[in-house]
Amino acid sequence: MYAGFWRRFFAFLIDAFIVFVIYILAFVGLVFAFMKGGSDYMRNMYFLAFYLFTFALNILYWTLFECSSWQATPGKKALGIKVTDMDGNKLNFAQSLGRNLGKIVSNFTFYIGYVMAGFTVRRQALHDKMAGCLVIDKNANPALLQPLPKASLFMIIVSITAVLLPLFLLVLVVLAAILIPSFMMLGSRIEASKALADMASVREMQGYYKSEKGVYASSMEELLDFKAESALPDFGPILKNNADFTYTFLPFGVSGKYNQSLGYTLTSCYDSDIECADVELTQFKKLKIAAPQECCIKEN
């Protein structure tokens, strides 16, 4: 009659996977937005928009599905359970929203609020009790909704120990081992990709410059003047020094020194498509490892 903890847990795993896929798609969009460049203000706006989107998705995904004609998310529907009020009726939007906002409180209890679904009288989690809701079998008869016998203190302790602690530790391990290092490296990877793209534009402009002048330009100003005089096509962003990179025009290529904690220098050669980093970077395995003065030397 009432949906127990484990059915609800596996339903959550299905829904979490669906939401995770949406997160990934949104995150890819964030990365592409960063690679397009823009001011620091715009980058902060990208992060803010991504944060607001993920927060709204966490609330609205469960809220809208559970007040729909399904009365269940895809995960709950797959497990044959649904969400109702205390009389077995369909929730309206306000009730469903209140239930899912109540999950914030359940989260702050170190997930004990969720484990309550394993031992409370009507198998209600903390947020179910707060919103006056039930999670029941999809074919349950509302007239037969009666309280179940109370679980013993021993079963409560077993439920918390066997479910909550391993799950909490698993989440911490996953975050520490996978997500945190990835996010720490993301900023450097995005900035370096943008720098290489901008340096490639300069390299292409230098090709036009040398074909006309016989030598390469020694500064961005010379290239821009030549571009204005010759009506060259738009090659991309104008290369400027910023908080992350300091660019230098060399006789054989253009280099960019990264000014943040990971100190390295990227080089893009004028007369080839060779790109180098002066240190070995795991995020740029395809780059040649060479100092600027050695990068563009052709190997026999």
Image (cartoon, rainbow, N blue to C red):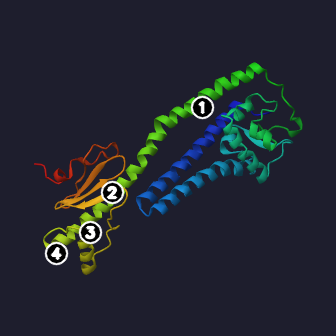
* Dot 1 crowding, Cα within 10 Å, few <14, some 14–19, many 20+: few
Q: Residues within 10 Å of mark 2 (few under 14, many from 20)?
A: many
Residue depth check, mark 2 versus mark 4: number of the one nearer the observer: 2
Residue 254 location (% of width, % of height):
23, 60
Q: Contact, CB < 8 Å: mark 2 with mark 4?
A: no
Instruction: Please state which of the two labelled residues, at mark 1 or mark 2, is closer to the viewer.
Output: 2
In the picture of the structure, the residue carrying the numbered disc 2 is 245
The residue lying toward the viewer, choosing from 189 and 4, is: 189
Q: Earlier in the sequence, mark 4 or mark 1?
A: 1
The residue that disc 3 covers is: 220
Q: Amino acid at mark 2?
A: Phe
Going from N to C along the chain, the mark reached first, 3 or 1, is 1
Q: Amino acid at mark 1?
A: Phe
Q: Percent x, y for residue 249?
A: 22, 62
Q: Tag 3, which secondary structure?
A: helix
Q: Are marks 4 and 1 in contact (CB under 8 Å)?
A: no
Residue 15 image offset from top left, x and y in percent: 63, 42
Secondary element at image label 1: helix
User: Which is closer to the viewer, label 4 or label 3?
Assistant: 3
Position of 165 with respect to 265 (left or right) is right
Is the Cβ of the residue at disc 4 closer than 8 Å to that at disc 3? no
Quarter holding residue 133: top right
Residue under pointer 1 = 168
Give the Cα distance between marks 4 and 3.
16 Å
What residue sits 55% from the left and 54% below the top? Answer: 50
Label 1, label 2: how many angstroms apart (C-alpha)? Answer: 40 Å
Which of disc 3 and disc 4 is earlier in sequence?
A: 4
Q: Earlier in the sequence, mark 1 or mark 2?
A: 1
Pointer 4 residue: 212
Q: Secondary structure at mark 4?
A: helix
